Amino acid sequence: MTAMEYVRNLGFGWNLGDTMDARVKEEERENLTPRKQETAWFNPETTFEIIKKVADSGFTLFRLPVTWTDFVGPAPDYTIRQDFLGRVAEIVSFGLENGMTVILNLHHEDWHFPSHENYPAASEKLMAVWTQIAEHFKPCCNKLIFEAMNEPRKVGTDVEWNGGDTEGREVVAKLGHDFIRAVRATGGNNAQRMLMVPLYAASSDEEAMGGYIPSGDDRVIVSIHSYTPYNFALSDDYSHHEWTPALEDEIDALFARIDKYFLSKNIPVIMGEMGARRKGDNLADRVAWTQYYAAAARKYGVPCIWWDNGRIEGPDNWEKFGLLERGKLAWAFPELVVAFLDLHQPAQKINAGHIVDAIDRIFSIASVMNNN
């Protein structure tokens, strides 16, 4: 199976956001536990039942964002704490056991600032951390994908979110290539595992897409994030809460760019994060946006993963992308789930629980738990 064929069969997915990727306050890091980080941003501990609810509803992709920083030791070994690695492995197994394809990444890390000056130190740490993760999960089959970084960018600069500068894009590409080399060097199933590398800031801007430098590895997927149109989907401006057909052009242009730079060149893409935040009572507008965005993605063969940070209620300045009320195992906005997964289609309804190759599933679960 080629990388393009692999991606074409993935379906749509769900992010376990603001959970394993949370950061605790600096004064609380001395005696930090995996549970304390997992619940630091007010989400509950992740259970098998939470992931089962997501899978049974029709989601086939499960992205697990993880911030490793506070559980990684000093140079030169950068040893990952085993209790944290074990907890991550347990949550990975929840996805695999429910027949999902799991994406595991490095998320809110602040040490891989993409400059030429910082590159040697960032590369050394990135390769050390990914070597340990890859070794731990090496027995897992190809239903587990590794994603190098989340949104690597020059934080706090004027090029942070606009596609970056030449230096930033070049260093992000070099770090992506280092990640691939580190994982491949561990051998076993990692020699053929599908890997994801982000553009600068995982940006959907033309500059970031044009700055992509292929590694020569034919089992690599490009990671892009796009909350498009920005004013409607992501900004704090509540005056942009209505969806109109006039905004469709921005989504059309997004996928046309993806096709131009990647799909037409047989380079697969996964939309690792997307969604439209809640702005008051604009559910009908969000449903209309979701239907259009998801239809465009299916047309081009780009799997999308909704960013669910668990925030459903709250102040206007909160990014309320939450879909699942995790404590209740209930969808807060089932209309969005139906629109996103296109569940009005009879075939999709039948496949809501998805059929999984039993041998592949058992091997995936056993591999993770035996290596835990």
Image (cartoon, rainbow, N blue to C red):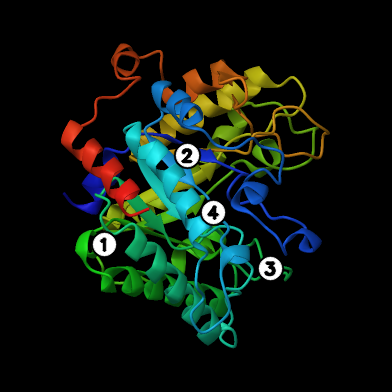
Please say whether residue 229 is visible from this viewpoint: yes
For mark 2, what is the residue? 305
Q: Which label sits on residue 66?
A: 4
| Comes first in the chain, label 2 or label 1 | 1
Q: Amino acid at mark 3?
A: Val
Q: Amino acid at mark 2?
A: Ile
- Cα distance in 3D space between marks 4 and 3: 19 Å
Label 4: which secondary element:
loop
**Dot 4 or dot 2, earlier in sequence:** 4
Q: Amino acid at mark 4?
A: Val
Q: Is 238 left or right of 301, judged from the image as shown?
A: right
Numbered tag placed on residue 216 in the rendering: none
Which is more toward the observer, 66 or 282? 66
Residue for point 58% across, 49% down: 20
- What is the CA distance from the residue labelled 4 to the residue labelled 2? 16 Å
Report the amino acid beneath label 1. Answer: Asn
Q: Is residue 97 above or below residue 332?
A: below
**Image vertical order of residue 39 relative to residue 330, above or below:** below
Q: Nearer the viewer, residue 97 or 33?
A: 33
Mark linked to residue 155: 3
> Nearer the observer, disc 2 or disc 1?
1
Query: Badge 1 is on which residue?
Result: 190
Q: Is residue 197 above or below residue 78?
A: above
Residues tagged 1 and 4 counted as in contact (Cβ below 8 A): no
Q: Is residue 101 above or below residue 151?
A: above
Label 2 and label 1: CA atoms lie apart by: 23 Å
Secondary structure category for the residue under label 2? strand
Measure how far apart labels 3 and 2 are at the Cα level: 24 Å
